[in-house]
Amino acid sequence: MAWIRLDPVTRKRLQRFRQIRRGWWSFLILSAAIVLSVFAPFLAESRALVVSYQGSWHFPTFQFIDGSRFGQEPPQGWSMDSMETEYLRLQREWQAERRLHTRAVAAVQGDAAAIAAADARYPNRGNWVLMPPIPWDPYQSDFWSNEVLYEIQAALDRGDRQRAAWLAHRDRLDELAELIETGRIDAVLADPAKAPTGRLPSLATTGAMPSLAGLGQSPPNAPGAARAHWLGTDSQGRDVASRLLYGFRISIFFALFLVLTGQVIGTFVGSLQGYLGGRFDMLSQRVIEVLIAIPFLYVVIVLAALFQPSFWMLLGILALFQWIAITFFMRTEMYREKTREYCLAARSYGASHLRIVFRHLLPNCLTPLVTFTPFAVVGAIFALTGLDYLGYGLPAPTPSWGELIDQALQVENRSKLWLTLAPFTALTVTLVLVVFIGESVREAFDPKRYARYE
């Protein structure tokens, strides 16, 4: 655009960055991941994206809609007037109606009266729900595998076989639904070898019915498509993929905010130290030495004991120390560059100190800045992950990679490979992308290749 003007040296540097393929593709991949994380409510959320009900469309992503709007029945003892629609359950109910309607129509072989009866029995067959790719928000627990058999058993205990069969169809337990509809479920439950207690949960534990073998297990549950838990669930039954996505958003923006703040302050202070020297340099160095001597982890622990940590609180604490490292490099670069002839020429023309520092000297001192900034991002992500792992980071149940790693390393979860692989893979891939970008930027901005002395 016309209002963005880049000098020839900067254009050459950017062109060189694009030529380094691993850095350029890493930048594109990481940028796409950041953009996707911004739109996380459209990718991982328990609210539907679109609901088509009786010819009208609803968009519940950012609004509360109670279940009575769509005729959803509440759980026993609850009122839907005060409960939000369970969109995943609604989707499964309407899908079950479509399947049963199709089966009923096929069975009557064109009988108009029977088809009309089937249409009346399944009035919601034409409605549909569009869920996000991950139909779970990061705070929602899913105990379906523990609850579904008890819900069906309760219907059987009441003698409501139709309801029991409908629940089995809704949750795609077709083998169990067929047994209930044909009445053979009684014989199966009466067999001690298949159901020692005579109830459905024991039928699942014996393995006599393979389609029920995965039910009745406590979280964490393995990855599977049945409930759209693509990376499984954690110890609380929460979706790992959803928590990874939201955890990435928190981690990357925390790191970017922290590094941006630290690098700006550190560059400003370090540049003035190297350029001005003298008393300002001596006093500021003493302040930096005092700050270096303070262990920031102890500061976080003490404040976490007094106050509940928050995103901005942790950002502020780490920002007190983040800017220090870059000051040493910028100070050294300024000491070296201010003795160059172009700096002396700028002084002879009467340029102000700020103009000399930020217009003439700083563009030629960018090498340490662009070299260490990606590694500062890596350090910031590690810092937040480490604090969350130790329990001094963001409060529960905030989605966090460190909290997932802590769960994975618990003794009882060490056999749950998805809990281990998911956060470690996400952390490794993110850090490798950042490092590749950093290496490429450092090579592209190398002053030995392109420099500007003015």
Image (spheres, rainbow, N blue to C red):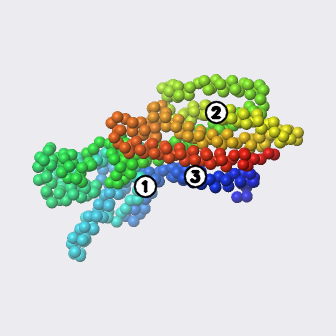
- In the rendered structure, which disc, 2 or 1, sits on the residue that comes first in sequence? 1
Task: Decide: is 339 above or below 148.
Answer: above
Q: Residue at x 27, y 49 (%)?
A: 214
Q: How many labels does the image show?
A: 3
**Contact flag, marks 3 and 1 (Cβ < 8 Å):** no
Q: Name the residue under label 2.
A: 325
- Label 3 is placed on what type of residue? Arg
Across and down, in percent, residue 372 comes to: 63, 40
Q: Residue at x 38, y 59 (%)?
A: 129
- Label 2 is placed on what type of residue? Ala
Q: Name the residue under label 1.
A: 132
| Quadrant of the image containing the N terminus | bottom right
Q: Residues within 10 Å of mark 1 (few under 14, many from 20)?
A: some
Q: Name the residue under label 3.
A: 22
Disc 2 is placed on an element classified as helix
Residue 227 placement, left or right of 317:
left
